[in-house]
Image: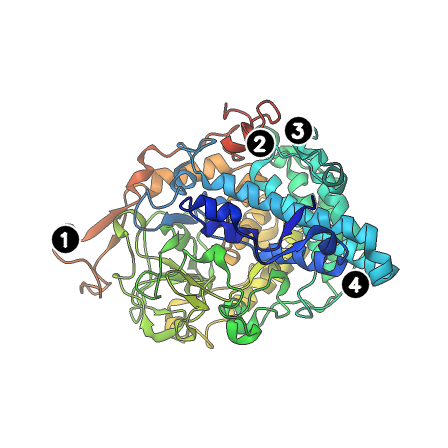
Amino acid sequence: MKKIYSILAACAMGMTLAGCNDFLDYTPTAVVDEDKAFSDPEGMVTSAYAMLGDCWYTYPFNLFPYGDITSDDCLKGGSGTGDTGYNAMDVWNTLTATTPGEMDELWYRLYCAISRCNRALLSLDQYGESELGAETTRQRVAEVKFLRAHFYYKLLTVFRKIPWIDETVEANATQEQTRNDEFTYDQLFHKIIDDFKTAYDVLPAKGPGEDGRANKYAASAYLAKCYLNLAWGDGYEANTGIAHINQDYMDSVVVYTDDFVSSGYGYLEDFGDIFLPEYKNSKESVFAVQTSDYEDDRTKYGRANWSNTLNGCWGMWSCGWDFHKPSQDLVNAFKTRNGLPMFDEYDDEQDYPINGQPTDQKWDPRLFHTVGMPSFPYKYEEEYTQTMANSRDAHDYGYYTSLKEVPQRSQGETYNGSWQAFAMNDYVFRYTDVMLMRAEALVELGRLEEARTIVNDIRRRAANSITKHISYAADQCEIAEYPASYFATKEQARQCVRWERRLELAMENGRFFDLRRWGIASATINAYYEKENGATYSIYDHNGNLMEGAPSGVADPNLPHGEYYRDAHFTPGKNEYFPVPYNQMFYIPGLYTQNQNYD
């Protein structure tokens, strides 16, 4: 009996248990014979690429619940703590192998993507040269290995103890005999590095926005990121941080980012443009998951970004579910004095700008591109000014909303049925991220002035990002370049680079992974819990007037939020990684072992 290879297996999710006999007798559509599929290597490669955007809010491939909600930058949001399972990411102390259940979906879907890649490699091995020719086959193999490494990087980043299932395992059908402790963390990383190196050695050095395929620069960025992670330690705080730095790996970060110095990639002139769909494949974009509008690809709904479907502003969009909420701590981090960050005092007082009411407190202009705030135009459009009513659960989560992952409201949604979705690319790497990785490595190698040049280039772009989109906040913005004295020592330079990374990449799904890499997650997150619990946001503006959309009949003009942080706690030696999901642990009992301290 021939096997059937399902192109649209996810459609089965829409089935119910009712009428199961009819379902069993049903002849499936949208499927092709597996032998026929395998004999089309180009089609198999395309199917592997399609998995890049095969996301949904319960298994977001951009990892926003794992990289942002877990950190000091972000609160879960939604209608309350029970809205989705992601509250466990927000508070850590309730995280188990079964809670949230969404972890199991992420694990499964990422391995589905890896299976697509392995099948494509087997097809290329059997049919590639006869169908595509030797050189095209060589490039397609390199592309698919890039994709496989991309998915494995996410699995390793989140779950640490993972089984390595490659095309050999796929061909031998030994997936259910492959343990997740066969290889160490370091060995798994080097397997991922080997795939990226294949891509790096073979793929062309294409410029930005050419065709969305993997290229040499994308592989170079990933190699730098892999080595940067390894350079700091193994991720657990006992073995991670300044005392554990591997200088050779830091050198590798610089070597692989050298490629970008004379590339066609660069800083997009205005920071705000980076997060508008019309600039999604600009020189800033090194590699991104591609999306489309139905008008562009002539399909019914387009290829939307379903990872971010929860993250629209409440009452602003047709289905704005108000997740991924910036924290007060993040907003405070954008404060400046004489144009420079207030490193030691940024969180002494809670503050926020109000449109048309400048005060002595000034702000880094990137705040107004990153965080939606009451009284300010939503994503630059005055006709859609945000109010205090644009929050589902202000008591818990405050009044801020995330701006980067949404288009302007006037552009509408790609899909606006019972859910909303947008044709917004997900950046895997943008140029500024790559340069900040380079600056981080340069600091640890003692090349402080080179690091300062990179950071000041980024700050100069931020300073030039006011007039075009946020002129209404011009009187509230102040940003300056770092003088040499701020990069006089490694300790000072390190603080500047880390701060810049937080502000530049805020709400881009990676803050927790940065804190873990540096070995400071527990200290940072637990201090954040202590400060944020009971944080307040006044319902009055700076002139004492009730703000638009403020709740009526409130006795206390300062509304608390974040009270659920009362019992929150990050445990080092455990919470650096997420548990192997229960369903995976017990699918074949005894095959997998659990991450430390989750037993």
The residue labelled by disc 4 is: 204
Please give the label number shown on residue 283: none
Residue 378: image x %, image y %? 37, 68
- The label nearer to you, 4 versus 1, is 4
**Does residue 464 appear anywhere in the picture?**
no
SS class of the residue under badge 3? loop
Please give the label number shown on residue 554: 1
Name the amino acid type tagged 3. Answer: Arg
The answer to whether residue 597 is above or below residue 324 is: above
- The label nearer to you, 4 versus 3, is 3
Q: Dot 2: few (<14), some (14–19), or many (≥20) neighbours within 10 Å?
A: many
Q: Which is more N-terminal, label 3 or label 1?
A: 3
Left or right of 179, for residue 19: left
Query: Going 64% across and 35% down the picture, which residue do you hit?
Result: 233
Please give the label number shown on residue 179: 3
The residue labelled by disc 2 is: 236
SS class of the residue under badge 2? loop
SS class of the residue under badge 1? loop
Query: Which image quarter is the N terminus in?
Result: top right
Residue 80: image x %, image y %? 30, 46
Q: Dot 3: few (<14), some (14–19), or many (≥20) neighbours within 10 Å?
A: some
- The label nearer to you, 2 versus 4, is 4
Left or right of 588, for residue 131: right
The answer to whether the residue labelled 3 contacts the one labelled 2, judged by CB atoms less than 8 Å apart, is: no
SS class of the residue under badge 4? loop
Name the amino acid type tagged 1. Answer: Val
Q: Which is more N-terminal, label 1 or label 2?
A: 2
Q: Which is more N-terminal, label 3 or label 4?
A: 3
Nearer to us in this view, 593 or 368: 593
The answer to whether the residue labelled 1 contacts the one labelled 3, judged by CB atoms less than 8 Å apart, is: no
